[in-house]
Image (cartoon, rainbow, N blue to C red):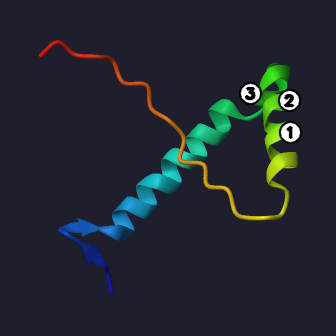
Amino acid sequence: MVMKTEGQNLIKIENLYDTVAREYAEAFSGELEKKPKDQEILYRFSQEIGNRRPVWDFGWVLVKPRNI
């Protein structure tokens, strides 16, 4: 059974996500090792949050402003 939501095939979406996630992991593996300040920020954040609640990382996308 293929689940669909509002005309979208969830299996296709999951497969695409898995493909992109693998490529992303290969391209950026070890990236944090070159960024000691980012390491410090993440360490402080993890100490602040601890085991109190889950943390969700939605990432970010840089969008170029467009003239309308």
**Mark whose residue sits in front, 1 or 3:** 1
Q: Estimate how packed mark 2 is, as few (under 14), some (14 to 19) or many (20 or more) residues with alpha carbons within 10 Å.
A: few
Q: Is residue 35 above or below residue 44?
A: above
Q: Estimate how packed mark 1 is, as few (under 14), some (14 to 19) or many (20 or more) residues with alpha carbons within 10 Å.
A: few
**Quadrant of residue 13 in the image?**
bottom left
Amino acid under disc 1: Tyr
**Mark whose residue sits in front, 3 or 2:** 2
Total number of numbered discs in the rendering = 3
Q: Which residue is mark 1?
A: 43
Does label 1 or label 3 sit earlier along the sequence?
3
Of residues 25 and 61, the one nearer the viewer is 61
22 sits to left or right of 36 = left
Which element carries disc 2, helix, strand or loop? helix
Of residues 37 and 30, the one nearer the viewer is 37
**CA–CA distance between discs 1 and 3?**
16 Å
Q: Position of residue 7 (x, y in %)?
A: 18, 68
For this orientation, the residue located farthest to the bottom is 1
Dot label at residue 40? 2
For this orientation, the residue located farthest to the left is 68
Which element carries disc 1, helix, strand or loop? helix
21 sits to left or right of 3 = right
**CA–CA distance between discs 1 and 2?**
5 Å
The reply to whether callout 1 and callout 2 are in contact (CB within 8 Å) is yes
**CA–CA distance between discs 3 and 2?**
14 Å
Q: Estimate how packed mark 3 is, as few (under 14), some (14 to 19) or many (20 or more) residues with alpha carbons within 10 Å.
A: few
Q: Is residue 3 above or below residue 48?
A: below
Dot label at residue 31? 3
Amino acid under disc 3: Glu
